[in-house]
Image (cartoon, helix red, strand yellow):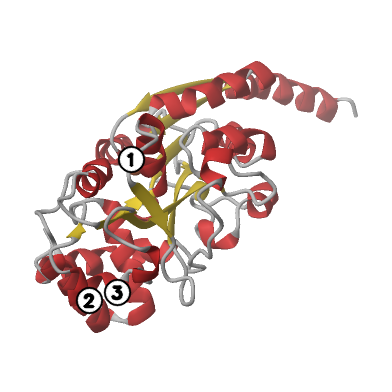
Amino acid sequence: MIRPLIAATLAFALVAPVADAADEVVVYSARNEHLIKPLFDHYTAQTGVAVRYVTDKEGPLLQRLKAEGARTPADMLITVDAGNLWYAAESGVLAGIDSPVLNANVPANLRDPQGRWFGLSERARTIVYSTERVKPQELSTYEDLADPKWKGRLCLRTSKKVYNQSLVATLIARLGEDRAEQIVRGWVDNLAAAPFSNDTKAMEAVAAGQCDVTIVNTYYFGRLEKKQPDIKLAIFWPNQQTSGVHINVSGAGVTAHAKHPDAARQLLEWLSSEEAQVDFAGLNLEYPVNPKVATDPIVAAWGEFKADALNVNEAGRLQADAIRLMDRAGYR
Ligand code: FE
């Protein structure tokens, strides 16, 4: 009669060392080291769980995950933009997880409906204008930047960047492909200069008088404002009477072949918690996804806005259409 008990004890003894190995999580991150290391250090100090990580651009990290397949050491992928997260999920490298904690902490429009990725910070892609040459009353929507009144006054970042692909994807989702193409053609007609390689250069061109308006992620505006507090630029929140400001996320998912899936889920849950969200968003001047967490004061000073309620997953689903559309419209 005692045998089953012994067998159970032996089984436990065999399983126990494997459970101990979960005292670490391996992360592949396209989010910069200086934005994640303080959080991982905090987590390790609190839980004793070591977090090992590799940082790189999203493309190489995803290629690596795909090439490694079942042999990957990675338990978690962190990357930016719903377009990239969607693509990683479609590539099969992320596992769907059902976590009541994550479902409670991350609003439904900022996560994958199948639980393969969860937004961890929210960024707004909005209009920045010259306070010397533009009155805010002249601005209204992303669509309006296609109006001939902005001819020779618009600067944009390159269409190669996923941020603009996601913005155009949401135009397609809301307005349909034909109307979206008209708008993008209008933007191209209004360009004052060839598209810039990054958001900061586009804003610097506005500040220098090369153009009057641009579209950028707010945290780049925050960084520029920190360096040059007197810069003659301001944020405008477009589409407040209609769809709201285009928002996107940085986020993460547990990998399909995680060696420490429970530990990875627990780290992900912690990153969405009130305790971690202050730094996860604040270190990059972004908005927390967890609605219980207050926004960093520098970011809050830009004012409240109505955000687009569309699920950011749509940005991924329509990404290929957006790329083709921008190509047809001559947006380089
Ligand atoms: Fe960025």
Q: Secondary structure at mark 3?
A: helix
Residue at the front extreme of this rendering: 132
Name which quarter of the figure residue 22 lies in: top right
Q: State left or right for residue 100 relative to residue 167.
A: right
- Comparing 216 with 10, the one in front is 216
Q: Secondary structure at mark 1?
A: loop
- Comparing 187 with 106, the one in front is 187
Q: Disc 2 marks which residue?
A: 147
**Residue 15 location in percent, x, y?**
66, 24
Name which quarter of the figure residue 332 lies in: bottom left
Count of residue discs:
3
Name above or below for residue 50 compared with residue 76: above
- Comparing 57 with 172, the one in front is 172
* Mark 3 nearby-residue class (10 Å; few <14, some 14–19, many ≥20): some
Residue at image location 30% in from the left, 61% down from the top: 134
Residue at image location 81% in from the left, 22% down from the top: 6
Q: Is mark 3 within 8 Å of ligand 1?
A: no
Q: Disc 3 marks which residue?
A: 144
Mark nearer the viewer, 1 or 3: 1
**Residue 93 location in percent, x, y?**
39, 46
Q: State left or right for residue 15 relative to residue 190.
A: right
- State if disc 3 and disc 2 touch (CB < 8 Å): yes
- State if disc 3 and disc 1 touch (CB < 8 Å): no
Q: Secondary structure at mark 2?
A: loop
Mark nearer the viewer, 2 or 1: 1
Q: Is residue 170 visible?
A: yes
Q: CA distance from mark 2 to mark 3?
A: 5 Å
Q: Disc 1 marks which residue?
A: 231
At label 3, which amino acid type do we have? Asp
At label 1, which amino acid type do we have? Ile
Looking at marks 2 and 1 on the same chain, the residue that comes earlier in the sequence is marked by 2
**Residue 175 location in percent, x, y?**
34, 81
